Amino acid sequence: MTRLAVSTHEVWLELLMAGFMASGKNKQILFDFSDIIFRHFTWMEQYLIDEGIEYDYNRQSIPIKVDKLSVILADIAFRLRQIDLQLIVCSDQALCERITSDIDYITFVLNNLEDETVSAFDLSRKFGDCDLTQEATDALTLFLFEESYKEYELIMIYNYLKAHTQDHYLIRVFQILIDESFFHLKSFGQMMADMGILGVPRVIYKELYKITDVAQFLKDGINEEILAKEECKKLSEAVGNESVELSRFFDCINMQEDYHIELMKRALEHYEGIDNDK
Amino acid sequence: MNFDSVLLEHMMEPKNYGELESHNSEGIGKNPENGEKVIVFLDVKGSDPKIEDISFQAIGCMTTVTAGSIITSEAKGLTFTRAQDLIAATLGILDDVPPEEAACSEMVVLALKAAMDTYMERRKDFEFPVISYKIENSCYPQNNIPVEDMKDD
């Protein structure tokens, strides 16, 4: 069952990456499917927790570099069929039936999507019509690699914490932070694809999400969000002269971090309250 | 960082990343200032030890991951003697790089050295613990003030 969760984790990311490579209607379909497979992953995770089975977020690296969308779609369909075959190890009949049904539909749709030429790996480092300076381009490049990984890391950490708490308030906060990080990851991933530098976020180090001191994690998280705000501000200033659109985007992300900080402060206060009541 | 196509490829798809499924040694390079660290996993074979396979994982920035991707790619397939030369040469190059830029690569090189040293120790004692080395360079420019520039008040 742990292997099944790992395979599902890998396909979720591969579908997300395919979404970045695609355009128009294909993009939305692939993002929606990616969201569905992420939900499968969280349901499998809950099954593992309920059954007392040890698991982690380790996975293999996922090769995504293709010239044509159809190539990665064929690989995704193959992996999904493998998952379907592995479902035999899961004793939750309702969950298995749901996943099988989804896989059946998703593979059917994937086989019929219109093919596209992929430019997400052409290393052009051009962002739309913006004529960024070399310095701004380099700053944006590094920011996108750092932050796309960071958002993936945050999704997985919050997801792990959410899966391992029974507290409704904390579950609500973690879910908001997961949703917010998904928006950031999708935004940064799309920019990377547009600039021809798309890459899958690397595997997360186990000790980052298998957290024993939640209060310390929240305190560190608040400090990290403050640093992230600074990075967004710097980047907004660096690209401000060349692109109002980019500058406005990073200002918006910067402001969103304020709300994350507030949520994490409230979560910390709540968590310490629970701890004191024990 | 100079973003040529080779460097970008390493950033997009870091080589040898993740825990090596079959490994007989590992070593850690860490930055005591901020908790960043790199673990190098080795699969070593032969009486004249040779790095058959290698991988790494990092809690660190993209520069660390890129350095890990490049250095582990160079180390794969080397005997320990050649790998020691690689370590010495890399540390030599880093001497001419600003400390805050050298810190990440130093962490990877020290993790490789720690993994090799762990392997040698485990030849004598199978249960020898994983060796860990701390970097000397600092990620933070303000912490790299040369001693001669420090003045007493």
Image: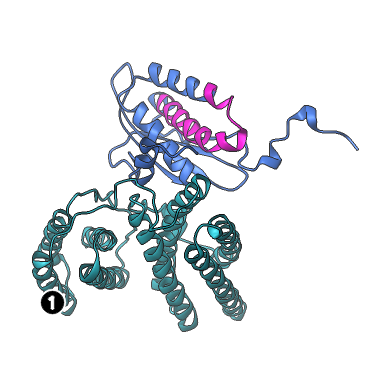
Which of the two residues, A147 or A244, is positioned nearer the viewer here?
A244
Q: What residue type is labelled 1?
A: Glu
Residue at image position (27%, 61%) is A9
Q: What stretch is highlighted in magenta?
A: B92-120
Please state, as top left, top right, bottom left or bottom right, where the C terminus of chain A lies in the image: bottom right
Which residue in the rendered view is the most extreme toward the bottom? Answer: A168
Chain A shade in the render: cyan
Q: Residues within 10 Å of mark 1 (few under 14, many from 20)?
A: few
Q: Is the magenta stretch mostly helix, strand or loop?
A: helix
Question: Residue A37's image quarter?
Answer: bottom left
Please state, as top left, top right, bottom left or bottom right, where the N terminus of chain A lies in the image: bottom left
Query: Residue A65: where, in percent of width, then height?
Result: 24, 48
Q: Is residue B102 magenta?
A: yes
Which residue in the rendered view is the most extreme toward the right? Answer: B153
Query: Residue B58: where, in percent of width, then height?
Result: 45, 45
Residue at image position (15%, 58%) is A79
- The residue wearing badge 1 is A97
Which of the two residues, A261 or A116, is positioned nearer the viewer here?
A116
Element type at mark 1 = helix
Question: Residue A157's image quarter?
Answer: bottom left
Query: Residue A117: where, in percent of width, then height?
Result: 19, 54
Q: Tell me if residue B103 comes above or below residue A151 in the rendering.
A: above
Is residue B60 at all visible to an observer of this figure? no
Q: Is residue A67 left or right of residue B134?
A: left
| Chain blue in the figure, letter | B
Is residue B116 at all visible to an observer of this figure? yes
Which of the two residues, A195 or B36, is positioned nearer the viewer here?
A195
Q: Which chain carries label 1?
A: A
Q: Tell me if residue A245 comes above or below residue B18 in the rendering.
A: below
Q: Is residue A210 magenta?
A: no
